[in-house]
Image (cartoon, grey):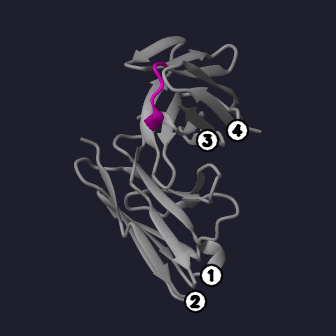
Amino acid sequence: GQNIDQPTEMTATEGAIVQINCTYQTSGFNGLFWYQQHAGEAPTFLSYNVLDGLEEKGRFSSFLSRSKGYSYLLLKELQMKDSASYLCAVSDSNYQLIWGAGTKLIIKP
Amino acid sequence: GAVVSQHPSWVICKSGTSVKIECRSLDFQATTMFWYRQFPKQSLMLMATSNEGSKATYEQGVEKDKFLINHASLTLSTLTVTSAHPEDSSFYICSAKEGGLGSSEQYFGPGTRLTVT
């Protein structure tokens, strides 16, 4: 079966750095996405990785290792507005998105 | 660019009635649109995939006669929840892809919160 695993909840301090991990087992791989979702709102796109390595975009970076079936989202200089759920999703061999359950990130002052 | 709208943003209806939700791609042509449902504190659940001009492909466990999907044009897909029941109360989100199978990103609409009383 297809499976995406990510921690249910994480807590971090404002101004700090947090890494949210995602491991996956899917039938085929056509890229991995990270989305941010605030409560009661639709997801918004953060990053897309299809090749191994680190993609940096401002305070957010995303890493992919296809051989390990592993990705992480790194958030730096955390702000209170970063409190949200972070969803990892993998595009499988049929280009269908397989979604993780999301990681709820709580930022404390 | 790549904006997807949904209408209405929230709706309350009585049990037994039908509700139609519209999803529009405002500045691109969406060959494929997706409908998701999300219950509180849970992840997105794909309900169906629709391609313009053809019948939608429903995920296992989703009743196609209850959740009617029409993708009549490259910019509009509709989801009709027929004979709604309280257990259908959920957050319904659509997304759209601009290109064909190989295109990557899905653009999400803002979601529609349905409450069935």
Q: Residue B16 — which label?
A: 2
Tell me how far mark 4 sits from mark 2, CA to CA: 36 Å
Residues indicated by labels 1 and 4 sit on the same polypeptide chain: no
Is B32 drawn above or below residue B68 in the view shown? above
Q: Residue A8 — which label?
A: 4
The image quadrant that residue A20 belongs to is top right
Q: Quick check: is A52 in the magenta stretch?
A: no
Tell me how far mark 3 sits from mark 1, CA to CA: 26 Å
Residue B45 in sight here? yes
**Callout 4 touching callout 3 (CB < 8 Å):** no
Picture coordinates of residue A78, whole percent (x, y): 48, 25
**Residue under label 1:** B85
Q: Residue at x 58, y 72 (%)?
A: B89
User: In the rendered structure, which disc, 4 or 3, sits on the residue that comes first in sequence?
Assistant: 4
Q: Residue at x 45, y 20 (%)?
A: A77
**Callout 2 touching callout 1 (CB < 8 Å):** yes
Residue A88 in sight here? no
Is A66 drawn above or below residue A85 in the view shown? above
**Residue under label 3:** A99
Residues indicated by labels 2 and 3 sit on the same polypeptide chain: no
Q: Quick check: is A80 in the magenta stretch?
A: yes
Q: Amino acid at mark 2?
A: Gly
Marked residue chain, label 1: B
User: In the rendered structure, which disc, 2 or 1, sits on the residue that comes first in sequence?
Assistant: 2
